[in-house]
Image (cartoon, grey):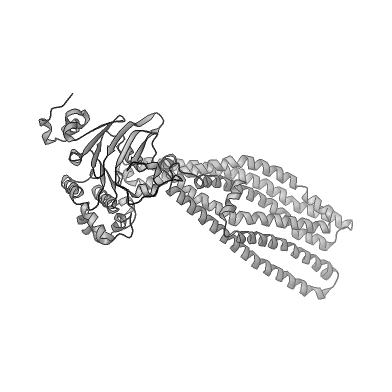
Amino acid sequence: MFQLRWIWKNMQGKRRFFVMGLILSVTTMSMMIIIPKLSQVLVDDVLKGGQTDKMFPVLLAMCGVQLLRTTLRYLMIICLEISSQHMIIRIRNHIFDNLVHQEIRFFDRNRTGDLITRVTGDIEYVRHTCAWIVYQFTDSVSVFVASIVFLATINLGLTLLMLSITPLIAVLSWRYIKRIRPIYAHLREKLSQLNTVAQENIAGYRVVRAFVREDYEIEKFSERSEQFRKANLTASYKWQFFSFVTNIISQSLTVIMILAGGLFIINGTLTYGELTAFSGLTWALSNPMRNFGVILNDLERFFASAEKVIEVYYAKPTIADRHDAVNISGNIKGKIEFKNVSFSYKKGQIVLDNVSFTIEPGETVAIMGPTGSGKTTIVNLLARLYDVDKGEILIDGINIRMYKLSTLRKSIGIAMQDVFLFSDTIDGNIAYGDPDMPEEDVFKYAQMAAADQFIRKMEESYNTIVGERGVGLSGGQRQRISLARALAVKPPILILDDTTSAVDMETEKYIQHQLNNNIDFDCTKIIIAQRISSVKNADKIMILENGKLDIGNHESLMRRNKYYREICELQNVPELEKVAFEA
């Protein structure tokens, strides 16, 4: 099966431990038949035959076998743990690496709670199968086969009678497998939904509190929890019924052994010692039959989990480096060209329609437009977070598909609209793009972003730990740290996506002055904003509406663009009355 080949592939480097574990499992379980054989000698030769000189050697041999078996079993478990832990860390690291390099569309399609379930619970169940279920299977098979061979050498007729019930077990197991697999797939989906609700509430607890939706969220979580409980019970009922039936069938071995064994003794074809050996090995036939159900149950859960893990493991991003991609990091000048670019997030919902424009190196360009008009989409396309549907985007005359992604994205510094700060120090967040950045640079770019003053007022200054997603900071403070982080990488293309929307006018004016006069590196600036004060001094202003583009400067757009003029009216732009609107 593919899942088993996938596991074997990820054990590379520690396969010898896995193989050694299986060999030790077979060895230790095969040794179990020695004790009944010694018991047979003890009954027939010592107790019945009167050969008392054999008693102590036989008892000593029993103790020695048990001690050796226990030692080998300990080594077996260690070997299987080493191989399974090695395998799981390879899988986990590969999946995380894969997730980090996925494009945004992947996360648009997959719930966060579902992904967390895959990289935690599902992976752990895969490891559990390799470390526990595999050796249970080899234990059961080896002791079953060894005991059959041993018992057949004693009395073939009685052995065959005891094996007569195995076809019934096989039929029941086959029917159980067909019924339980979709049930476990459904159970795993309900767990994923439960985790998603929990993750969303933890991440969005401020919104829940602000809208007083605690009762609603509790009810939603309870509903998902109840669905998970019902799915668990359905799986449990199926398993317990199968286990109940197999237990009854396997326990019948004892009845068969007593009745048939008694008849064989009466007929003189079986000795008391041989019956003792049969009695001692009855469990060796019944236990594997019982364990077979447990193993099948766990294997079905393994396949349900493994399928989900494998989906993420082999998920390939559609946005990736070409084989002939170029790496010219540090040499990008910052000329940007959109040529007849069209894009839609969903089929039929066009966001950009045949958009073309050029931004020269060093220019400052502002982008405005109604909500959902595609302003942030331009940023996403430029950084290849998405790929265009039609047309092409060029930087310095080269199609961005020809750049290595690392080169392209290192050349673009983005202060995003949705600010995300890591649970790290403020210093660590600003220097995120370059962890080796000198402290002086961190301070300098924090000053340019108007963040230095409030940072130094904090108890631990730049060493203050920022809570998850910037908890404890105001929206404006988070925006300024995000701006400092974008500036600190000295990108040839700097994108400010509504970066000053949460700061006061005085702070915005200071930031604009710093960006216009004090940046110590050459860069092309793209500013996405809705404040006229943020965009009116730009070299170009682009208005996006209904997928179309209108380009001009402040004065020309006030005269001819209705949307821009309305924004100016709403914001009481002083020179508005001096400019006549061209219908």
Q: Position of residue 164 (x, y in %)?
A: 78, 48
* The furthest residue to the left: 578
Q: Nearer the viewer, residue 113 or 209?
A: 113
Q: Nearer the viewer, residue 329 or 148?
A: 329
* The furthest residue to the front: 397
- Looking at the image, is 387 positioned above or below residue 485? above
Identified at 65% across, 59% down, the residue is 22
- Looking at the image, is 264 positioned above or below residue 357? below
Identified at 72% across, 51% down, the residue is 251
Q: Position of residue 295 (x, y in %)?
A: 63, 50
User: What is the quadrant of residue 447 in the picture?
Assistant: bottom left
Q: Nearer the viewer, residue 313 or 193?
A: 313
Q: Position of residue 544 (x, y in %)?
A: 27, 33
Identified at 48% across, 54% down, the residue is 93
Q: Is residue 512 left or right of residue 60?
A: left
Q: Is residue 220 left or right of residue 437?
A: right
- Asked whether residue 498 appears in the rendered view, the answer is no
- Asked whether residue 527 appears in the rendered view, the answer is yes
State the quadrant of the C terminus.
top left
